Amino acid sequence: MTDPHPTVLHLPRRIGAINTLGLWTLYRKEVQRFLKVFVQTLLAPAVTTWLFIIVFSLAFGQNRPAVDGVPFVEFLAPGLILMSILNNAFANSSSSILVSKVQGNTVDYLMPPISAGELATAFIAGAATRGLLVGAFTAAAMLPFIDLVPDVPWAALYFGIGAALMLGMVGVIGGVWAEKFDHMAAVTNFIIMPLTFLSGTFYSVSILPEPFQTLSHWNPFFYMIDGFRYGFTGHADGNVIIGAAVVAAINLVLLIACYLVLRSGWRLKT
């Protein structure tokens, strides 16, 4: 007779060196999280940046001289696009981790068999995706008014992706460190925004007197904005190759820091 209750052997699941399913699932969760409120996360930043362009065009566009042959508005646009990429990449990873800590559901990504490297990759990739999508939406909103065809496509791509990754990683570290929303607001208001505004977003650092011109070159945001602007206009205030190396070095350090912080479980395992 056939046994009506056959014995089922539950073999251990073999995940392999990389848990691709877990990594992809967490990445999708990060992306769907901001796509569900795309009016707030994608369209609103694009409209805000578009208003910046309108105001600067009406108030200063006709009176400001060209910067090394580049009309002022065309000089300004890449800086504003990258600023939106930076802010939104940081906001995505930092808010995702902080909200999960406040709501007490960090267990959702700490309990599954996902390594610290896979956690870091998913959070950073999700943040970079949002930053780049916001940048694309912002550029699309400017296209009817400004020529945004890249002169040096590799530079625009490299510095755009590098900036999104950098602030995504800063957001991971900030989200783990923060214990309440006031902490994240402090990081945004006293670190991210000052570094962005003092990096040449709205002006060429070459017009600054010393020692402010030299100090600007110690600001990592300067190299990202300068390189990204070079990609669209062919104009750069600094050395683009040095800037590319600085961005790569900082991103490597931040990646290691994200991995170590997530592996330690600091302020996550409570």
Image: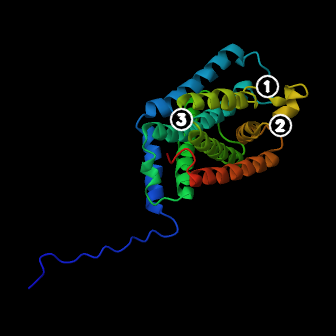
Mark 2 surroundings: few (<14), some (14-19) or many (≥20) residues within 10 A = some
Please state which amino acid type lies under the numbered disc 1.
Ala
Q: Mark 1 points at which residue?
A: 66
Tell me which residue sits at (76%, 48%) in the image: 244
Tell me which residue sits at (58%, 21%) in the image: 51
Is 227 placed left or right of 84 in the picture?
Answer: right
Return the residue found at the far bottom.
Answer: 1
Image position, residue 32 (x, y; %): 42, 43
Contact, mark 1 vs mark 3 (Cβ under 8 Å): no
Placement of the N terminus among the 4 image quadrants: bottom left
Callout in the foreground (2, 1): 2
Q: Which quarter of the picture shows residue 63?
A: top right
Contact, mark 2 vs mark 1 (Cβ under 8 Å): no
Callout in the foreground (2, 3): 2
Q: Name the residue under label 3.
A: 137
Helix, strand or loop at disc 3? helix
**Cα–Cα span, label 2 and label 3:** 29 Å
Image position, residue 214 (x, y; %): 88, 33
Which numbered disc flags the more N-terminal residue, 2 or 1?
1
Helix, strand or loop at disc 1? loop
Q: Which quarter of the picture shows residue 74?
A: top right
Is 262 placed left or right of 9 in the picture?
Answer: right
Contact, mark 2 vs mark 3 (Cβ under 8 Å): no
Callout in the foreground (1, 3): 3
Mark 1 surroundings: few (<14), some (14-19) or many (≥20) residues within 10 A = some
Return the residue found at the far left.
Answer: 1
Which numbered disc flags the more N-terminal residue, 1 or 3?
1
Q: Name the residue under label 2.
A: 217
The colour scheme of the drawn protein is rainbow
Helix, strand or loop at disc 2? loop
**Cα–Cα span, label 2 and label 1:** 22 Å
Q: Nearer the viewer, residue 73 or 216?
A: 216
